[in-house]
């Protein structure tokens, strides 16, 4: 472990701030991709149809070396699955972050429904469907992904959070 006085202050500050735990997904069938994303922001706005210049957006920082990043391009649909506050959801987040093995692939864990916008987790606390508008810029070491919101639904319960390296239920 890194001694306290040698730890990166910015990383320590980031650890103070709670983050949502989501799984971003795209594709269908054998072409599905997904990744755990905790650096997420939802920018409120108008519906895409009523005012495309001020449409709501979902913004995420994605590991540029992930298979999900390789699958994203402008116009590609995505589903942002907001994980429920449960022990099982924390284990699923670790699988999609590739911290825990998943024999047969990550989508063998949890119960998923294929949709045109990407796989939806059946017991998600909420989900947002969106269409990628840009994914070529970087923010720090991550790929900055912007997507215009197409639809959103809050299902039930509280969402899983992450703070100081631990899941918050």
Image: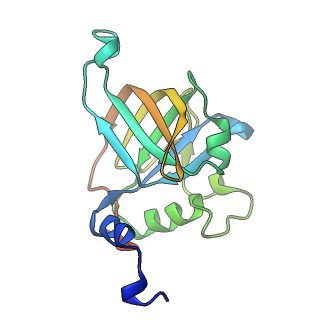
x and y, in percent, of residue 104 in the image: 74, 58
**Is 144 rendered above or below residue 115?**
below
**Is 51 rendered above or below residue 72?**
above
Foreground of the two, 35 or 140: 140
**Is 156 rendered above or below residue 102?**
above
Residue depicted at x 52% and y 62%: 92
Foreground of the two, 16 or 58: 16
**Displayed quadrant of residue 101:** bottom right
Q: Is residue 50 visible?
A: yes
x and y, in percent, of residue 23 in the image: 49, 50
- Marks counted in the figure total 0
**Displayed quadrant of residue 4:** bottom left
Q: In the drawing, does residue 92 fall left or right of residue 22?
A: right
Q: In the drawing, does residue 90 fall left or right of residue 106?
A: left
Foreground of the two, 86 or 58: 58
Q: In the drawing, does residue 57 fall left or right of residue 130?
A: left
């Amino acid at each position: 472990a890194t001694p306290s006085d040698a730890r990166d202050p910015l990383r320590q500050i980031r650890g103070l701030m709670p983050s949502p735990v989501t799984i971003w997904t795209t594709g269908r069938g054998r072409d599905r991709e997904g990744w755990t994303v905790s650096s997420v922001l939802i920018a409120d706005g108008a519906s895409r149809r009523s005012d495309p210049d001020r449409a709501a957006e979902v913004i995420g920082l994605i590991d540029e070396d992930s298979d999900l990043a390789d699958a994203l391009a402008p116009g590609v649909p995505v589903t942002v699955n907001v994980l429920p506050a449960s022990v099982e959801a924390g284990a699923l987040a670790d699988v999609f972050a590739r911290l825990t093995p998943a024999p047969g692939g990550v989508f063998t864990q949890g119960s998923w429904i294929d949709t045109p916008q990407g796989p939806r987790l059946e017991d998600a606390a909420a989900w947002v469907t969106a269409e990628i508008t840009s994914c070529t810029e970087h923010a720090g070491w991550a790929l900055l992904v912007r997507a215009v919101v197409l639809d959103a639904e809050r299902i039930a319960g509280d969402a899983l959070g992450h703070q100081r390296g631990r899941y918050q239920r």
